[in-house]
Image: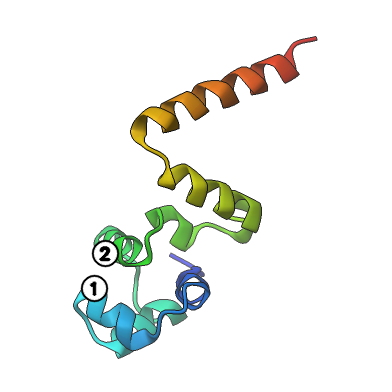
Amino acid sequence: MGPNRLKQLRKARGITLDTLAAKVGTTNQQISHLELGKRQLTVEWLRRLAAALDCHPWEIVAGPETSGSREAELLKCFRSLSETDQERLLVAISELASSRQAP
């Protein structure tokens, strides 16, 4: 699967190997092997880790260019909104993007 951002995401949230291991029901050695790429990050691992890290599974495997600090802050704010407000925000963003593309 290649490099991943598991260690970076874990450390950014101030979570230890032991704490993350406990949250996903495994050992700190297994988490370490996943972080180092010694064990494969399966879809099931991605789901479990993403739930424990409060992120989307693809954030774990995405390159830094797809998950910069501005995007992370936007995502954090978006997740704090109610479903209704999320929908309203998506409509507003779509309208803004459309208006900027018009000649």
Secondary structure under badge 2?
helix
How far across and down, in percent of the image, does residue 61 sit? 47, 61
Q: Say left or right for 66 vs 51.
A: right
Which residue lies under the disc numbered 2? 48
Query: Farthest left residue?
Result: 25
Q: Nearer the viewer, residue 26 or 73?
A: 73
Q: Say left or right for 89 vs 45.
A: right
The mark nearer the N terminus, 1 or 2, is 1
Residue depicted at 47% across the width and 57% down the height:
59
Quadrant, the N terminus: bottom left
Residue depicted at 51% across the width and 29% down the height:
89
Quadrant, the C terminus: top right
Q: Which mark is residue 24?
A: 1
How far across and down, in percent of the image, does residue 74 sit? 56, 46
- Image quadrant where residue 99 sits: top right
Q: Badge 2 local density, few (<14 within 10 Å), some, or many (20+)?
A: some
Q: Are marks 1 and 2 in contact (CB under 8 Å)?
A: yes
Q: Give the color scheme: rainbow, by chain, secondary structure or one colour.
A: rainbow
- Image quadrant where residue 102 sits: top right
80, above or below 69, in the image: above
Residue depicted at 38% across the width and 56% down the height:
57
Q: Badge 1 local density, few (<14 within 10 Å), some, or many (20+)?
A: some
Q: Which mark is residue 102?
A: none
Identity of the amino acid at label 1? Val
C-alpha span from label 1 to label 2: 6 Å
Identity of the amino acid at label 2? Arg
